[in-house]
Amino acid sequence: MELEQIIQNAADRLQEAGAAGASIGLILGSGLGAYAETLDNKRYVDYASIEGFPVSAVVGHKSRFVVGEKFGKTVVVMQGRFHYYEGYPQQMLSLGVRVMKRIGVENLLITNAAGGVNYPAGTLMLISDHINLSGSNPLIGRNLDSFGPRFPDLSNVYDKALRAKAKALAAADGISLAEGVYLMMAGPCYETPAEIRMARALGADAVGMSTVPEAITAAHCGIKVVGISLITNAAAGVLDQPLSHAEVTETANRAAAEFARLVDRFVSDLF
Ligand code: HPA
């Protein structure tokens, strides 16, 4: 099925679920999906019910859109995202963002769990920029001209003005919010200590396996992006201990309340 058709199928389903008028999109990362439950008047659209739409099978990820209201605003949430390491070409990872564009979303908050290169576990990090070492790009293939240009500018993917405002809002609420560069690796294995030394040398503060394809897709179609990484673990080799997905979800669960407070503030006042 053509990408445009899948996007249309999903947009139709979301419109039926009352997503018209939504200007805020939210993509919730590993262990952070519970925030969607805090929306009022929730409507669910399972990815599996949308013809042609991929489904995520990762533990800690649901696989559905949630439409709901928060602070009087309509919000569309991807509760569970797809990852490159699941075997999808990156253009399939772009679908959710393009669906959001079709229903009118102008601002997208992308969240993820990440390994800390320069920050300890538990840190909330505003993404200032990214480095794409995934080895691919969601815009490879025929350009969808109705979404954006063949060669999009990426000099302000994580909108500078929104970042300044985000930091001020977090500070006013007493939420400590670091800032830094997110580096994407393809995964699914965690990095080697040598790769983390490389990431640090390249200027990365956090490493993960998501976010970059979605952020690129949003930049392509003119959606403003704010990114938050929850540092769930010290990256490989930083501490003398192995990494595990259980550690990632445990830290995410522990930070869930603080994370929800920050996202609430952004939904209510940032956009
Ligand atoms: N590396 C890559 N992705 C991750 C990590 C990590 O250390 N932690 C959570 N997601």
Image (cartoon, rainbow, N blue to C red):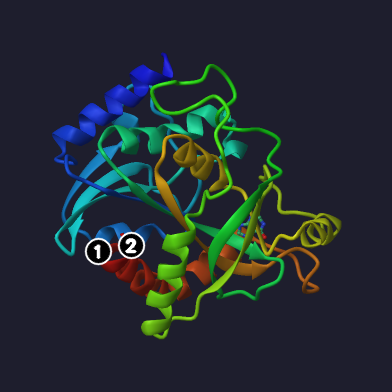
Between the C-alphas of marks 1 and 2, the distance is 6 Å
Q: Is residue 86 visible?
A: yes
Kind of residue sitting beneath label 2: Tyr
Report the disc number at residue 231: none
Tell me the quarter of the image containing the N terminus.
Answer: top left
Say which amino acid is labelled 1.
Answer: Thr
Residue drawn at (57%, 43%) of the image: 154
- Position above or below: 13 against 35: above
Residue 104 rendering spot, x and y as whole percentages: 26, 39
The C terminus lies in which quarter of the figure? bottom left
Q: Where is residue 153 in the image (x, y as percent from the top left)?
A: 56, 38
Q: Badge 1 local density, few (<14 within 10 Å), some, or many (20+)?
A: few
Q: In this view, does 56 lie to the left or right of 24?
A: right
* Helix, strand or loop for disc 1: helix
Please, which residue is most extreme toward the bottom here? 174
| Ligand 1 under 8 Å from disc 2 Cβ | no
Q: In the rendered image of this protein, does residue 70 appear above or below residue 133?
A: below
- Could you say where residue 47 lies in the image, as x and y percent from the top left? 34, 34
Residue under pointer 2: 35
For the residues labelled 1 and 2, say whether their Cβ atoms are less than 8 Å apart: yes
Residue at image mark 1: 38
Q: Which one is in front, 167 or 79?
A: 167
Foreground: 25 or 167? 167
Quadrant holding ligand 1? bottom right
Residue drawn at x 34%, y 17% as measured from the top left: 5
Number of marks in the rendered image: 2
**Where on the picture, by quarter, is residue 10?**
top left
Residue closer to the observer: 125 or 196: 125
**In the figure, is residue 130 to the left or right of 133?**
left
Q: Establish if 90 lies above or below 168.
A: above
Q: Residue 137, position in %: x, y?
A: 61, 33
